[in-house]
C-alpha cells in the first residue's frame, strides 16, 4: 500500500507535474487569501553567528567575511523607512549571534510596536525559553525558525555540533509562548531525495505553522558547499506548491533566494501558492555582508518595491492593507493533509 510520504515524493519527483501542481496550489491560495500579497520588511541587523551550518555564508568558520552589528537606532531607523513605504510587518533577522544584546533587541521591539504599530517578526536562531519569553513580552508577534530539513540524518550532516531535537524544542517553546511560528526547509541539500523532502511536507501539515518558507539552497562563497550545483527551479516550485496543498492556510513567501535560481522563479512562485514577499530594508552599507547565500543583484530597496509592485499588477494581485496575522496557530488548529 502506498504511503502518503511515497505519494508526495512521487509528485515531487515528476517533472511533468510542475504546471498542474502550481495551478492546484494557486487555486488554494486564492481560496484562502484572495488576490492579495503580503509585504514584509526585513532588516538584517547582525551577520555574526555561532553556527557552523555547511551551506550558510555567515557561519562561524567563514573567516574572510566582514562582520557587522547594526546599532539599535539604525535598526529602528530602517523600520521607520519601511513603515513610511506602507509595510506593516518588520522582520528583524540575524545570525545566531553569541554576543547578541538581548535586552537591546527587546527594547527595539517595544519601540517599533509603540511608535509604528507594526507587527514584529524575529528570526535570530535558537535561544533558551526565557529569552523567547522576554522578546514576546516586549511585543514580538512572530518568530521564524526554519527546521531546514525534517530528515534527521541529513540535518545532522549539514549542521555540525547542532541538534535537531533542540531545534524542535525551540519551536515547541515558541508555540507555547504564543508566537505566530514560522518554519521551513531548503531544497537542494547534498544527499537530499524526494523522500527527504516529503518528510518536510508532512511536518508542515502536522504542525500549525503560520508561515512556511521553502527556498532553494544557493551555494554560498566561502563554505564547504560553494561548488554545489543549484537545484532546478521547477523542483523548488513543486515544493512551494505542495507546501500550499498540505498547509493551505499558512503564509508562504516567494523567497528572495528564488531570484538567484532564475530571474522568473520568484514571480512564478506567486502563481504556485506563495502569498508573501520580503523586501530588504537593511542599510545598503551592511546588506551585501549578510551573505547567507550568493544573492542576485536586484538593485535598491526602491527598485525592488517598484519591480514587485509591477509584478503584482501583472498577476492581478494587490498588496494587503493589513499586517497578515497567522490563522493556524492562533486558531490552535492543525491542518489536515490535502492533495493526493
Image (cartoon, rainbow, N blue to C red):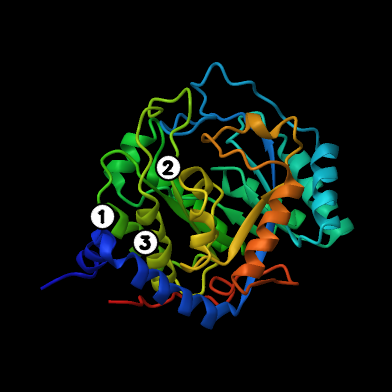
Q: Spatial distance from mark 3 to mark 2, Cα to Cα?
A: 15 Å
The answer to the question of whether label 3 and label 2 lie on touching residues, with beta carbons closer than 8 A, is no
Label 1 environment density (alpha carbons within 10 Å; few <14, some 14–19, many ≥20): many
> Between residues 13 and 146, which one lies in front from this camera angle?
13
Asked whether residue 88 appears in the rendered view, the answer is yes
User: Farthest residue in the left direction?
Assistant: 1
Marks 1/2 in contact by CB < 8 Å: the verdict is: no
The Cα–Cα distance between marks 1 and 2, rounded to whole angstroms, is 15 Å
Check disc 3: other Cα within 10 Å, few if <14, some if 14-19, many if 20+: many
Name the residue rendered at 59%, 36% in the picture: 95
Which image quadrant: the N terminus?
A: bottom left
Q: Position of residue 98 (x, y in %)?
A: 61, 30
The residue sitting at 38% across, 60% down in the picture is 239
Question: Label 1 belongs to which residue?
Answer: 194
Q: On screen, 89 above or below 249?
A: above
Percent of width and height locating residue 23: 41, 74
Is 318 displayed left or right of 211 in the figure?
right
When the figure is inspected, residue 43 is found, relative to residue 291, above or below; the finding is below
- Residue 65 image point, x, y percent: 58, 21
Quarter-wise, where is residue 199 in the image?
bottom left
Circle 3: element type: helix
What residue does disc 3 label?
A: 238
Would residue 325 be seen by someone viewing this image from the given angle? no
Q: In the rendered image, which residue does mark 2 sit on?
A: 217
Quadrant the C terminus occupies: bottom left
Spatial separation of the CA atoms under disc 3 and disc 1: 11 Å
Amino acid at each position: 500500500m502506498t504511503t502518503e510520504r511515497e505519494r508526495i515524493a512521487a509528485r515531487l519527483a515528476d517533472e511533468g507535474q510542475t504546471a498542474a501542481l502550481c495551478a492546484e496550489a494557486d487555486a488554494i491560495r486564492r481560496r484562502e487569501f484572495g488576490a492579495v500579497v503580503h509585504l514584509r520588511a526585513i532588516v538584517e541587523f547582525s551577520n555574526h553567528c555561532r553556527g557552523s551550518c555547511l551551506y550558510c555564508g555567515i557561519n562561524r568558520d567563514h573567516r574572510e567575511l566582514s562582520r557587522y552589528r547594526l546599532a539599535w537606532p539604525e535598526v529602528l531607523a530602517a523600520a521607520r523607512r519601511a513603515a513610511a513605504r506602507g509595510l506593516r510587518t518588520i522582520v528583524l533577522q540575524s545570525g545566531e549571534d553569541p554576543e547578541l544584546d538581548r535586552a537591546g533587541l527587546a527594547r527595539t521591539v517595544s519601540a517599533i510596536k509603540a511608535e509604528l504599530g507594526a507587527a514584529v517578526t524575529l528570526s535570530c536562531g535558537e535561544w533558551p525559553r526565557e529569552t523567547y519569553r522576554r522578546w514576546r513580552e516586549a511585543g514580538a508577534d512572530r518568530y521564524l525558525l526554519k527546521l531546514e530539513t525534517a530528515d534527521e540524518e541529513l540535518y545532522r550532516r549539514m549542521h555540525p555540533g547542532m541538534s535537531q531535537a533542540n531545534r524542535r524544542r525551540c519551536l515547541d517553546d515558541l508555540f507555547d509562548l504564543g508566537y505566530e511560528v514560522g518554519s521551513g526547509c531548503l531544497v537542494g541539500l547534498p544527499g537530499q531525495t524526494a523522500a527527504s523532502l516529503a518528510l518536510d511536507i508532512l511536518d508542515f501539515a502536522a504542525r500549525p505553522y503560520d508561515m512556511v518558507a521553502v527556498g532553494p539552497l544557493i551555494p554560498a562563497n566561502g563554505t564547504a558547499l560553494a561548488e554545489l550545483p543549484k537545484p532546478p527551479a521547477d523542483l523548488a516550485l513543486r515544493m512551494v506548491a505542495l507546501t500550499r496543498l498540505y498547509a493551505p492556510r499558512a503564509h508562504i513567501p516567494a523567497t528572495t533566494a528564488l531570484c538567484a535560481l532564475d530571474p522568473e522563479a520568484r514571480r512564478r512562485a506567486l502563481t504556485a501558492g506563495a502569498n508573501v514577499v520580503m523586501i530588504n530594508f537593511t542599510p545598503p552599507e551592511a546588506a551585501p555582508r549578510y551573505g547567507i547565500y550568493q544573492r542576485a543583484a536586484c538593485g535598491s530597496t526602491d527598485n525592488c518595491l517598484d519591480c514587485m509592485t509591477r509584478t503584482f499588477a501583472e498577476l492581478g494581485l494587490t498588496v494587503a492593507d493589513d499586517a497578515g496575522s497567522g490563522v493556524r496557530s492562533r486558531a490552535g488548529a492543525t491542518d489536515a493533509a490535502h492533495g493526493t
